[in-house]
Image (tube, rainbow, N blue to C red):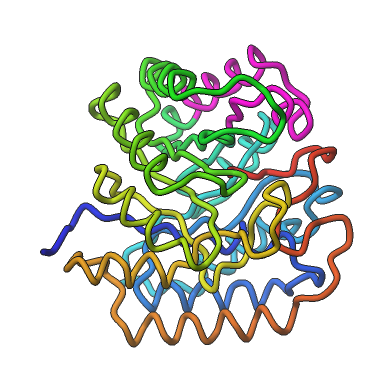
Amino acid sequence: MADSTITIIECPRDAWQGLAHIIPTEEKVKYLTSLVSLGFRHIDAVSFVSPKHVPQMADSEAVMARLSEERAPSREAPEIIGIVVNQQGLERALATPGVTTAGYPYSISAYFRRANANMSRAESRALVEKLQRDTKAAGRRLVVYISMAFGNPYDEPWGPEIVEETVVWLKDIGVRTVSLADTIGHASPQEVATLVRAANACVAGVEIGVHLHSRPDGAAEKVLAAYEAGCRRFDGALTGLGGCPFAGDALVGNIPTEIILTTLAARGVATGIDTKSLAIACAMTHELREKHAGEASGANHTGESGPETRETARPN
């Protein structure tokens, strides 16, 4: 069964920012251009945060300028997501041609929010409201990622009702795309399905996506659970690069895009990425990953900074 409503978001920004070696701008542009030519239409490509904390993303404006130059005039521009964590970041994103969507990580964990963004709940909500107003005025889109949506490792209160309240608030202020992030990668397929259904049930008209972490052997089940619960928006990272150190398991990382695509294809779902294109994308990702991987400095090798940093721009 073909499903034209499926949206696959490829997340090289998420995968790259924890690599030990800085990827040259030219290589980033070549990689992103190749993704677009292979059929990837939605890409989490850049972030607008302090280079001090995320040096891999210091060239985001330069990457986007070159990407615009490389795009063939006849080819439809892809959706490019730029992650922001404050007003300054949004101003940079809105001033950068080619960034169609701003992404903001909103944590429902007080500890995680304070450690990574140094904000109170009220401050973070005020920022989201401003992001919504400013992106709308600029003709851009906004996606809000709910970090720690499936629980947290800090023994803080958590329950689906907290997520539901957050999603309802986001709808009320005009946000129309929300992604539920399993930051620590501990959600079971049943828990994924239950939360996706609950979120969909309380906010008709809002696109509910998932940004999941998993061990490779459990990834397909989570994807299928989300799909059967009504999710049609999936974040992934080719080869599974990126993740969260809080999971306490080196094998827990971003769900590989190839698992998302093959799992949906087995259900007869059309994703817009054929087998040949996927194989090419995986091969070039492995090549780039092997070239620039190593012992990361100040970040976990899976791609997520530790909890005591600032402006880490982690949506998950």
Residue 31 placed where, x, y %?
56, 76
Residue 76 placed where, x, y %?
32, 64
**Screen quadrant of the N terminus:** bottom left
Q: What residue is rendered at 58% in x and 35% in y?
A: 148
Question: Which region of the structure is painted magenta?
Answer: 106-134
**Closest to the observer: 103 or 194?**
194
Note whether 92 is above or below 134 in the view shown: below
Horizontal relation, residue 295 to residue 290: left or right = right
Q: What residue is rendered at 35% in x and 38% in y?
A: 208
Horizontal relation, residue 89 to residue 108: left or right = right
Q: Main secondary structure of the magenta part?
A: helix
Residue 305 placed where, x, y %?
77, 50
Q: What residue is rendered at 69% in x and 26% in y?
A: 155
Residue 195 placed where, x, y %?
38, 34
**Closest to the observer: 156 or 305?**
156
**Count the marks: how many?**
0
**Screen quadrant of the C terminus:** top right
**Closest to the observer: 111 or 217?**
217
Q: What residue is rendered at 33% in x and 72% in y?
A: 262
Horizontal relation, residue 297 to residue 158: left or right = right
Question: Is residue 304 part of the magenta span, yes or no?
Answer: no
Note whether 304 is above or below 93 in the view shown: below
**Quarter-wise, where is residue 271 in the image?**
bottom left
Question: Is residue 128 part of the magenta span, yes or no?
Answer: yes
What is the residue that sits farthest to the top in this orientation? 122
